[in-house]
């Protein structure tokens, strides 16, 4: 993917050559069949995995993505073998992926790369980061350098979040 | 009152700078209007018919004298010299320029105020009743929990892009004066037999296109779990609320679709996963916040004051004002005073000029502890006036035209800004309110008609809360002309009810007559001092209908689609 920002040990950087290819649907699969690093729709990912991956004996080379109306619970058994999960923002005004990220991180304890895809814009990046996203595929018509400025947000968080699990009143 | 510490200041100041940058990017076209829109809304900025409107948060309706002076300064420097107080205890400035907004927000930050989340699809300003902390019938002061909720919901990253706006109200008196049952979440705080502070939680109330009275989702939530429980409700809503149709996106639609039992079960499941976590409010935090709301240094005063009693006896006008404006205080010798913002033709309901704000700020210091409240009925309140000072206060208010003795009466009209300002409105609200106020200027008539609420909204978004007015008036558009649909029997408070549509809509010119006929019918049927709402409950709307629509066969028939 192009225009990707990633966090490494909390520091943000622009990814020069992101290896991932985002696959919207099965029809796109043919074109990229030789490519290893695909981010597939979750149902398609299940179909494409070798048995060893499905048995949890081998790491998958492919990631999957969830649509905003998909539940997180069904992915639970693959968390140990998947290298990346992406969540969709069909519009930056659609906030469902924030809750999905929260659940994946805190309840299912997903610790790998969590990527925001779709209508991902500078002014929402700090919220995404708070909710546990670690990479951000910025909308391709936007400058990724500008978008970097959006990650810091506001230094005070009254409540809590994925990356700051204690509310301010327990941090005073 | 609550005072900002370094964290609060840092948050509002960083937010101002963030918005300053966003405004600059918008002005240079780096940000498209579509992308800028939710950002400006979450900073209180709407685009209206003639200019931008800035809605400033007044958390749970509490203002210091200095904050009111800041609002006066903003009204004078950046607006046309006045502001409009709203039904959600906020203030709106109607003539704002985008370029100046960051500077206005800077002014607010210096006075410990902000406009964060006063609009947008997020948790809005948390409201309570204007008499919190002083009402004689109060069980527990709701302000500490309101402040805890304010902080919790401010820039909470998971819940800034909800399906739709989300309003929370909290109250803790025998009489609900915060309209909690018409909020997305309504909270009633009470004490269990063992003294523990508990909350009754209502969910899914709201007005707008689909008016619904909220349902109880939890009867006995321990106060420590307030934040986790609200979080659980928000998470279920964020995930499952409809996003395909903005008119069906409020939580009330989700609650209705699932049924309260299934919705409650879903929330319960979510809550169980988080209720034992760090969101549990600590005693220390509650005490820290509650310390900001300890009672001021009241004097020990006698229950009876000779001078006050004499003034009441000698001045009929003063006595009339007292009868409408003075609310029982929990401390002997004190009273809470409602300052009517509804003088009639001289100013629209809720509008207060910069000069008036400054005088009220001073009066709050002179006759109180420097604190002013905003009531959900759009009036202002001085919460701590010694009864001995009431006469002097009344005289001072009279000098600025704010001693109208009409609180709770027919001319104490709740009205949205309507078609004069708002781009959503189907019809004007203010001229209707003023025409009615003008017709009923006669104080004897007004006081004889008794307790009666008239609420006007310029469109079905219901900012004027027309559904819960004893008489509700809704502006509707009929082939380009403005018509008004009337409902009867709505009520707020413990017995919240939605009014019933009385029949075909009326033209603007007919409205004062319509109200007069309704009052005449009420007077025909009332028994001794029976209030208007009780009569409507007892006899139903038919007698009112008959008096309004008899001999009206020649009236224009408005279109059927305006009737729900």
Image (tube, rainbow, N blue to C red):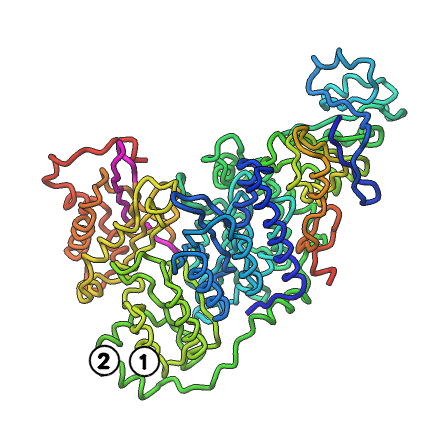
Q: Estimate the x, y position of residue B438 in percent, counting from the top left.
A: 20, 58
The reply to whether label 1 and label 2 mark residues of one chain is yes
**What residue do we see at 76% from left, 24% from top?**
A39
Specify the quadrant that holds the C terminus of chain B: top left
Q: Estimate the x, y position of residue B285 in percent, counting from the top left.
A: 67, 65
Q: Estimate the x, y position of residue B304 in percent, counting from the top left.
A: 35, 85
Residue B333 image label: none
Q: Is residue B237 visible?
A: no
Q: Which residue is mark 1?
A: B391
Question: Does the segment drawn in magenta span residue B483?
Answer: yes
Nearer to the camera, B389 or B329: B389
Question: Does the segment drawn in magenta span residue B457?
Answer: no
Query: Disc 1 or 2, which lies upstream in sequence?
Result: 2
Callout 1 touching callout 2 (CB < 8 Å):
yes
Among all residues in the image, which is located at the extreme top? Answer: A30
Nearer to the camera, B100 or B287: B100
**What residue do we see at 73% from left, 54% from top?**
A166
Q: Which residues are magenta?
A: B476-494
Residue B315 image label: 2
């Amino acid at each position: 993917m192009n225009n990707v920002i990633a966090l490494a040990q909390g520091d943000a950087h622009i990814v020069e050559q992101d290896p991932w290819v985002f696959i919207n649907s099965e029809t796109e699969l043919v074109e990229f069949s030789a490519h290893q690093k695909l981010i597939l729709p979750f149902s398609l990912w299940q179909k494409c995995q070798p048995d060893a991956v499905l048995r949890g004996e081998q790491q998958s080379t492919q990631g999957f993505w969830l649509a905003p109306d998909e539940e997180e619970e069904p992915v639970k058994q693959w968390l140990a073998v998947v290298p990346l999960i992406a969540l969709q923002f069909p519009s930056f005004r659609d906030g469902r992926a924030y809750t999905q990220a929260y659940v994946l991180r805190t309840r299912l304890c997903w610790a790998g790369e969590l990527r925001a895809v779709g209508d991902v814009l500078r002014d929402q990046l700090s919220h995404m980061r708070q909710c546990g996203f670690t990479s951000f595929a910025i909308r391709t018509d936007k400058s990724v350098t500008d978008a970097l400025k959006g990650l810091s947000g506001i230094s005070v968080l009254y409540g809590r979040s994925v990356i700051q699990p204690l509310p301010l009143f327990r941090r005073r | 009152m609550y005072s900002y510490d370094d964290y609060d200041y840092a948050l509002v100041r960083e937010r101002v700078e963030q918005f300053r940058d966003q405004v600059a990017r918008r002005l240079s076209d780096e940000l498209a209007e579509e992308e800028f829109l939710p950002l400006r809304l979450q900073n209180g900025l709407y685009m209206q018919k003639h200019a931008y409107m800035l809605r400033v948060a007044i958390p749970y309706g509490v203002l210091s004298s200095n904050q009111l002076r800041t609002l006066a300064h903003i009204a004078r420097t950046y607006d046309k010299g006045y502001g409009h107080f709203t039904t959600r205890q906020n203030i709106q400035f109607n003539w704002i320029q985008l370029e100046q907004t960051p500077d206005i927000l800077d002014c607010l930050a210096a006075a410990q105020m902000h406009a964060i989340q006063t609009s947008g699809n997020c948790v809005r300003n948390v409201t309570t009743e204007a008499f919190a902390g002083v009402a004689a019938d109060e069980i527990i002061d709701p302000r500490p929990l309101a402040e805890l909720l304010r902080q919790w919901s401010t820039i909470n990253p998971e819940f800034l892009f909800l399906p739709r706006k989300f309003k929370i109200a909290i109250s803790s008196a025998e009489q609900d004066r915060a309209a909690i049952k018409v909020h997305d979440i309504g909270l009633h705080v009470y004490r269990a037999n063992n003294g523990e502070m508990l909350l009754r939680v209502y969910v899914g109330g709201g007005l707008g296109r689909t008016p619904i009275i909220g349902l109880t989702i939890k009867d006995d939530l321990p106060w420590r779990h307030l934040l986790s429980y609200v979080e659980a409700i928000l998470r279920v809503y964020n995930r499952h609320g409809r996003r395909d149709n903005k008119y069906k996106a409020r939580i009330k639609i989700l609650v209705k679709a699932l049924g309260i039992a299934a919705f409650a079960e879903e929330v319960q499941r979510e809550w169980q996963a988080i209720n034992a976590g760090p969101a549990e409010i600590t005693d220390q935090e509650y005490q820290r916040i509650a310390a900001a709301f300890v009672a001021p240094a009241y004097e020990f005063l006698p229950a009876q004051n000779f001078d006050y009693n004499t003034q009441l006896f000698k001045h009929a006008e003063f006595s009339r004002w007292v009868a409408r404006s003075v609310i029982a205080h929990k401390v002997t010798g004190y009273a809470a005073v409602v300052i009517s913002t509804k003088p009639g033709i001289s100013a629209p309901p809720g509008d207060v000029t910069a000069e008036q704000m400054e005088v009220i700020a001073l009066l709050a210091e002179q006759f109180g502890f420097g604190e002013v409240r905003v009531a959900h009925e759009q009036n202002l309140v001085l919460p701590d006036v010694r009864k001995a000072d009431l006469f002097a206060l009344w005289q001072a208010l009279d000098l600025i035209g704010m001693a109208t003795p009409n609180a709770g009466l027919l001319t104490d009209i709740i009205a949205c800004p309507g078609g004069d300002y708002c781009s959503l409105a189907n019809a004007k609200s203010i001229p209707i309110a003023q025409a009615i106020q003008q017709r009923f200027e006669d104080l004897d008539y007004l006081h004889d008609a008794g307790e009666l609420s008239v609420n006007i909204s310029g469109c079905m978004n219901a900012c004027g809360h027309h559904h819960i007015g004893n008489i509700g008036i809704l502006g509707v558009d009929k082939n380009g002309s403005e018509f008004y649909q009337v409902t009867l029997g709505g009520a707020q408070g413990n017995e919240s009810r939605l009014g019933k549509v009385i029949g075909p809509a009326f033209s603007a010119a007919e409205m004062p007559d319509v109200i007069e006929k309704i009052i005449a019918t009420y007077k025909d049927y009332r028994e001794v001092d029976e209030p208007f709402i009780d009569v409507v409950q007892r006899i139903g709307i038919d007698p009112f209908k008959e008096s309004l629509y008899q001999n009206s066969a020649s009236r224009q028939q408005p279109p059927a689609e305006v009737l729900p």
